[in-house]
Structure formats: C-alpha cells, structure tokens
Amino acid sequence: QVQLVESGGGLVQAGGSLRLSCAASGRTFSSYGMGWFRQAPGKERELVADISWSGASTYSADSVKGRFTISRDNAKNTVYLQMNSLEPEDTAVYYCAARRTGIQEYIYWGQGTQVTVSS
C-alpha cells in the first residue's frame, strides 16, 4: 500500500511558477513509476507527466512540454512537478499517482492540490 499526499498548489499569475510535491509513504516507493495528472472543471483527467522508478525515463504531455518538469528523490520518497510559464489553461486540480514498474495502470492516487492561474 502506498499513500500519496500532494502539496504546493495555489494561486499564481500567468507566467509564474509553482512546484508541486507528492510525498509517499511506504518503503517501496522507489519501485513505483509516478505520474502527475490534472483535471479541470468539465474536462477529463489527463496525464501531464510520468517518471520511471529510477528517474531515468520521463514523459511530458505536449501541452506542458518545455514548461513542466517531473523529477523524484527516492531518498525522500517524493516526486515533484516544477511548473514554469504557467498559463490560465493550466488551472486544474493536480493529482499524483503511482504505478508498478512496467505497468501503465496507476493504482494509488493522492487527494489532489488545486492550481489556479490568473490572467
């Protein structure tokens, strides 16, 4: 079992930056791939970024490529999402999630943190 707790959301002006953190419980954090998702009102949840268990492999959605960076610190059981050049379209609830290595299904989810970008 892995429990995930996100933090770092808030209100920011367009062009600003935020860093989201996701703290995980459990001793097996380093064996899980991690993802950041977001869901805006009236829209489907979308995968924003993903990182492999070692951090060697990452994925970013086209909509955030070049602006958002996912990283992890296995010693701290934490995954991060650095968000730069934020746009009003990035406004959403952001969730972190965990998947077992080699499997694309995310099985553990955090409660989410709100990110609001004002124009």
Image (cartoon, helix red, strand yellow):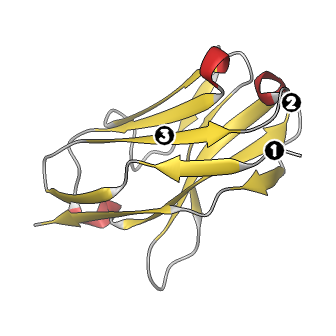
Name the residue beneath numbered marker 1: 2
Q: Position of residue 40 (x, y in %)?
A: 44, 74
Q: Circle 3: is it few (<14), some (14-19), or many (20+) Cα within 10 Å?
A: many
Q: Residue at x 53, y 50 (%)?
A: 6
Sequence-first disc among 3 and 1 = 1
Residue depicted at 13% across the width and 55% down the height: 14
Q: Which mark is residue 79?
A: none
Identify the element where label 2 is drawn.
loop
Q: Secondary structure at mark 3?
A: strand
User: Label 3 is placed on what type of residue?
Assistant: Ser
Quarter-wise, where is residue 90 in the image?
bottom left
The residue to which callout 2 is attached is 101
The outermost residue toward the bottom is 42
Q: Is residue 100 above or below residue 53?
A: below
Residue at point 10%, 67% (across, down): 119
* Residue 33 in view of the camera: yes
Tell me how far mark 2 sits from mark 3, CA to CA: 21 Å
- Sequence-first tag of 2 and 3: 3
Provide residue 71's location: percent of width, then percent of height.
52, 25
Residue 104 rendering spot, x and y as whole percentages: 82, 44
Check disc 3 and report the residue beneath it.
21
Left of 90 or right of it: where is 25? right
